[in-house]
Image (cartoon, grey):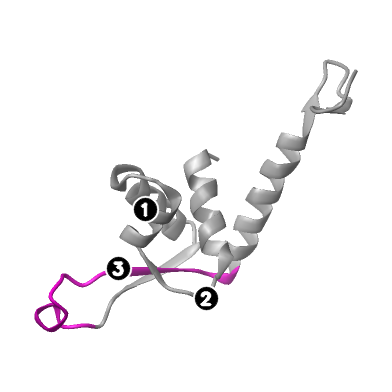
């Protein structure tokens, strides 16, 4: 999983019940829209996210409606697993013998 995808999942997991719109996610994760929206589409197709259009009148609020994204229960579980796997991979490097050594330790 890419660092951008992991960053977005971490943001979504910070409060999984909040609905977030694309610009908010893009701003918080530092991801450009050309990367963000394909990620959101993939996560939604996988069942990790649900989305809906904001229920506002664009003329009243003075801007277009936003698409709001929320982690599903399955998505929150999968996001936690993906982030934990990345943390584990960063903390242990594999040696040719298959034994793990801490990267910050001495051999």
Q: Which image quarter holds the N terminus? A: top right
Q: Which residue is mark 3?
A: 67
Q: Earlier in the sequence, mark 1 or mark 2?
A: 2
Q: How many labels, in total? A: 3
Position of 2 with respect to 90 (left or right) is left
Q: Position of residue 85 (x, y in %)?
A: 70, 45
22 w.r.t. 5: above or below: below
Residue 70: x and y in percent read 46, 70
Label pair 3/1, CB-CB below 8 angstroms: no
Residue found farthest to the top: 96
Q: Which residue matches tag 2?
A: 17
How far apart are the two marked residues, 3 and 1, measured between alpha carbons? 13 Å
Q: Is residue 58 above or below residue 28?
A: below
Residue at horizontal 21 percent and vertical 83 percent from the top: 56
Q: Residues within 10 Å of mark 2 (few under 14, many from 20)?
A: some
Q: Please indicate whether residue 6 sits to the left or right of residue 96 in the image.
A: left
Q: Is residue 60 left or right of residue 80?
A: left
Mark 1: few, some, or many residues within 10 Å (few <14, many ≥20)?
some
> What is the secondary structure assignment of the residue under circle 2?
loop
Q: Which residue is mark 1?
A: 26
Residue at (83%, 19%) from the top-left corner?
A: 95
In magenta, the rendered stretch is: 56-73
Which residue is rendered at x = 86% and y = 28% of the image?
Answer: 100
Residue 61 x %, y % = 16, 80
Badge 1 marks a residue whose secondary structure is: helix
Q: Reading the chain from its start, which is encountered first: label 3 or label 1?
A: 1
Q: Position of residue 20 (x, y in %)?
A: 40, 68
């Amino acid at each position: 999983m890419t660092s951008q995808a992991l960053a977005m999942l971490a943001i979504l997991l910070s409060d999984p019940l909040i609905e977030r719109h694309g610009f908010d996610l893009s701003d918080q994760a530092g991801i450009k829209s050309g990367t963000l929206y394909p990620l959101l589409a993939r996560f939604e197709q996988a069942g990790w996210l649900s989305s809906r259009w904001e229920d506002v009148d664009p003329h009243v609020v003075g801007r277009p409606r936003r698409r709001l994204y929320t982690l599903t229960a399955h998505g929150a579980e999968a996001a936690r697993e993906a982030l934990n796997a990345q943390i584990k991979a960063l903390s242990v490097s594999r040696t040719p013998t298959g034994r793990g050594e801490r990267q910050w330790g001495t051999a």
